[in-house]
Image: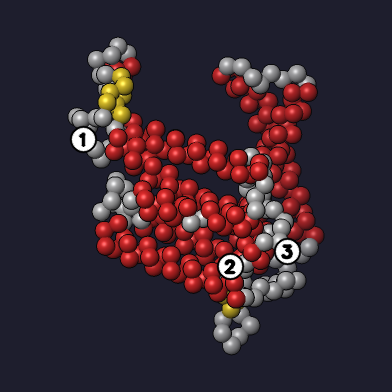
Amino acid sequence: MRGLFRYEEKDTIMHRLDPRVKLCWVFGMSVLSMLLGTPLLLAAAFASTIPFWAMVKPSGAKVRAIIFVFGTMVFGFMLTQSFFYYWGDPENPTFTIIPAAFPVLGTLTGGVHFYLEGAVYGLLQSLRFMTTVSAASVFVASTHPSELLVGLVRFIKVPFTNSWIGVPNEIAFMVSSAVGFAPSMIEESIIIINAMRARGLEIKGGIRTKIKALRYIFFPMVVGLLRKGRQIAIAADARAFRATRNRTFVDELQLRVSDYVMIIYIVAMVASGLILSSIGFGGTAPGLGA
C-alpha cells in the first residue's frame, strides 16, 4: 500500500508526457465519468485507463494494492447503496434481511432491506470513482512533484509575451507537497507500528485491543508529520521561496508530438461522452440512465 501513491522514476511514454497534458487527461476522465450513466459505458471508461497503467509498468506490489483498493471500493459502494437506496420503491425491496417486526434491531431500524437497484447504483458510483482514481494514480506514478509544480505555475503561455497563466506559486507548492503526503503518512505509520511492536504492543485482537493500539500510534504519527512539515517549511525558506514574484525553473516545459496526440485523444474522449450523454446515455439523479 505504501507505493500506491508514490512517484516511480522510470523512462516510459507516460513519464515523458508533459505534466500539463496529464493533468488535462485526469480532468477529462473525471468529466467523462460524470457524463456517462450506464454500467457498460462507465466500465469502458475505466478500462480505457488500463493501457496507461501498462505504459507506466507498475510493480507487482502496486498492482496488487490497486486491485485490493478497487475491489474494496466496488464491494463497499454496492453493499452500502443496496441498503440505503432512496430512489426505489421502499415497499418492494428485492429481499428483506431483518424484518421490521424483529426484536430490537427491526424496531430501531424499521427493517433492513436489500434493493437490487441500489446495488446497481452503487456499481455505477464505484465505476465513476474508480475511473477518476485510476487516472489520478497513473498521473502521480508518472509525474515528479517538481514537474507538477512547474506545470501548475506555467500552465499556458500568453502568446507573444513572456507571461504565463497558472496557479500562484504558493498553491502549486502546496499541491505538489500534498501529493507526497499520503506515502509519507503510510511510511510513518509503518515505522511507528514496527517500533511499538518491538516494545511489546499487541495489535492483533479484538476491537478494544485495536483502539488501544491506535491511541499509541496516532500521536507519534501526528508529531512526525508535523516535524516533516516544519522541515519542508525551513527548506523552502532557505531557498528563498516567495522572495520574487517571477520564479525561474531549471527545466522548461515544451509540448512534443506525443503531447499533441494525447490532447487529441482527450478531446475525442470528452466529446464522445458529451454526445453519448446528449442522446440518452447520461446519468440521471439516481444514476440509472436517462
Q: Is residue 267 among what the camera can see? A: yes
Residue closest to the eye, 85 or 192: 85
**Amino acid on which disc 3 is placed:** Phe
Instruction: Specify few, some or many for label 1: CA neighbours under 10 Å numbering under 14, 14-19, or 20 or more.
Output: few
Pick out the residue farthest to the right: 238
Label 2 Cα crowd, 10 Å radius (few <14 / some 14-19 / many 20+): many
Q: Mark 3 points at which residue?
A: 241
Quarter holding the C terminus is: bottom left
* Residue kind at label 2, given as amino acid type: Arg
- Which mark is nearer the camera, 2 or 3? 2
Considering only order in the chain, which callout, 3 or 2, is on the residue closer to the N terminus? 2
Secondary structure under badge 1? loop
Q: Where residue 101 sits: x, y (%)?
A: 24, 15
**Separation of residues labelled 1 and 2 (CA atoms):** 46 Å
Residue carrying label 2? 20
Residue lying farthest top?
Answer: 103
Q: Tell me where residue 197 appears, x and y as whole percent.
A: 74, 23
* Residue 55 percent across, percent down from the top left: 61, 58
Circle nearer the N terminus (1, 3): 1
Above or below — where is 231 with respect to 203? below
Q: Mark 1 points at which residue?
A: 89
Q: What percent of the width, then of the height, locates residue 174?
A: 63, 56
